[in-house]
Image (cartoon, rainbow, N blue to C red):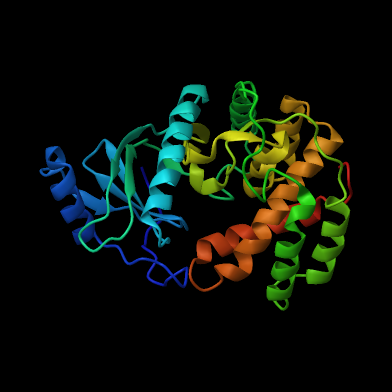
């Protein structure tokens, strides 16, 4: 799998845990002796939640970058592993499956996980932005995920995928922090429209984070989907964030037509992409320029689609 060319050297979070190859080497050797002979190398990329390392050719270790409660982190990893396995079973494209759960050690204070490694090239905001074929692949993915039974479960999270107006406080913070970086007045006015959209009604299963970094491509087609640990019931429009993170207007139109999205579903997807992108520009301006640039390109696409129902 090809990742970004350089590793992040600036801390992204005030409470970020320091992790290097030597730490993971000791963790693996102590806890999984069957992998002692396998090389370990950090995967360069723009991820913000986990440090990713390859173990040999077939496995990937994910070590949380933040957290101070090992028990809570372990419970989160167990829930994510169950969701990851369920997502891999539902996705028509390759997806990682859980392999093992590691424990704190070697100076690293949190539990960590091992998954299967999925080959492919990580998508970027521009790599397939005009591709009708990729838009069709996205529609295939979203449709298959939505078709999975929720098991009667409700929305269990907070924020994205629930009630739009729950994001008001966060959006106010983002608007304040973005002064001088973005056209805040225009963005505030747009949020005032989007936050009033009606509720979607019935929930559906969603991936929950279809950003470029979680989608793998080859020859312009979707071949893999990463980070399915948030797979669960939510607003069905949530996975439409991919429309603005990855596609220009021509390809977005293909995606919308393929899914048959009505105005409400489409604009709620736009609202969730907006809510996500607003936090990226200012928060990662210095520490993760790739994520900050993603926020800018997504917001540009959202503002371009400047009339409700377009």
**10 shown above or below 19:** below
In percent of width and height, residue 139 lies at: 65, 28
Residue at position x 53%, y 40% in the image: 230
Question: Relative to the observer, which residue lies in front, 295 or 251?
Answer: 295
Number of residue marks: 0
Residue 203 found in image quarter: top right
For this view, does 101 lie left or right of residue 23?
right
Question: Relative to the observer, which residue lies in front, 111 or 60?
Answer: 111
For this view, does 113 lie left or right of residue 95?
left
Residue 6 found in image quarter: bottom left
Residue at position x 49%, y 66% in the image: 288
Instruction: Give the residue at the far front of this rendering.
Output: 71
Residue at position x 64%, y 63% in the image: 279
In percent of width and height, residue 87 lies at: 50, 29
In percent of width and height, residue 207 lies at: 57, 36
Quadrant occupied by the N terminus: top left
Quadrant occupied by the C terminus: top right
Residue 111 visible in rendering? yes
Residue 224 visible in rendering? no
Question: Relative to the observer, which residue lies in front, 69 or 304?
Answer: 69
Residue at position x 10%, y 43% in the image: 37
For this view, does 119 lie left or right of residue 292?
left
In percent of width and height, residue 298 lies at: 67, 54
For this view, does 213 lie left or right of residue 135?
left
**254 shown above or below 75:** above
């Amino acid at each position: 799998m090809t990742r970004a060319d350089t590793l992040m050297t600036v801390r992204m979070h005030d409470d970020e845990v320091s992790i290097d190859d030597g730490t993971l080497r000791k963790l693996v050797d102590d806890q999984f002796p069957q992998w002692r002979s396998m090389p370990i190398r950090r995967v360069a990329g723009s991820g913000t939640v986990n440090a990713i390392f390859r173990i040999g050719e077939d496995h990937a270790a994910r070590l949380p970058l933040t957290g101070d409660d090992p028990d809570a982190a372990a419970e989160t990893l167990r829930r994510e592993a169950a969701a990851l396995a369920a997502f891999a079973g539902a996705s028509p494209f390759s997806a990682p499956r859980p392999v093992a759960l590691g424990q704190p050690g070697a100076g690293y204070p949190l539990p960590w996980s091992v998954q299967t490694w999925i080959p492919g090239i990580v998508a970027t905001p521009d790599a397939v932005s005009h591709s009708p074929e990729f838009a069709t692949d996205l529609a295939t993915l979203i449709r298959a995920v939505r078709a999975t039974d929720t098991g009667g479960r409700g929305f269990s999270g907070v924020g994205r995928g629930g009630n739009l107006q729950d994001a008001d406080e966060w959006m106010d913070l983002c608007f304040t922090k973005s002064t001088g970086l973005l056209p805040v007045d225009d963005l505030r006015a747009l949020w005032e429209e989007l936050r009033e959209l009606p509720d979607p009604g019935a929930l559906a299963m969603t991936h929950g984070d279809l950003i470029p970094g979680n989608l793998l491509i080859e020859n312009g087609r979707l071949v893999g989907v990463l980070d399915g640990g948030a797979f669960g019931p939510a607003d069905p429009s949530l996975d439409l964030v991919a429309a603005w993170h990855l596609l220009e207007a021509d390809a977005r139109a293909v995606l919308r037509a393929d899914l048959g999205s009505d105005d409400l579903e489409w604009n709620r997807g736009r609202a969730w992409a907006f809510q996500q992108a607003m936090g990226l520009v200012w928060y990662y301006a210095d520490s993760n320029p790739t994520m900050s640039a993603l926020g800018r390109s997504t917001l540009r696409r959202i503002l371009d689609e400047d009339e409700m129902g377009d």
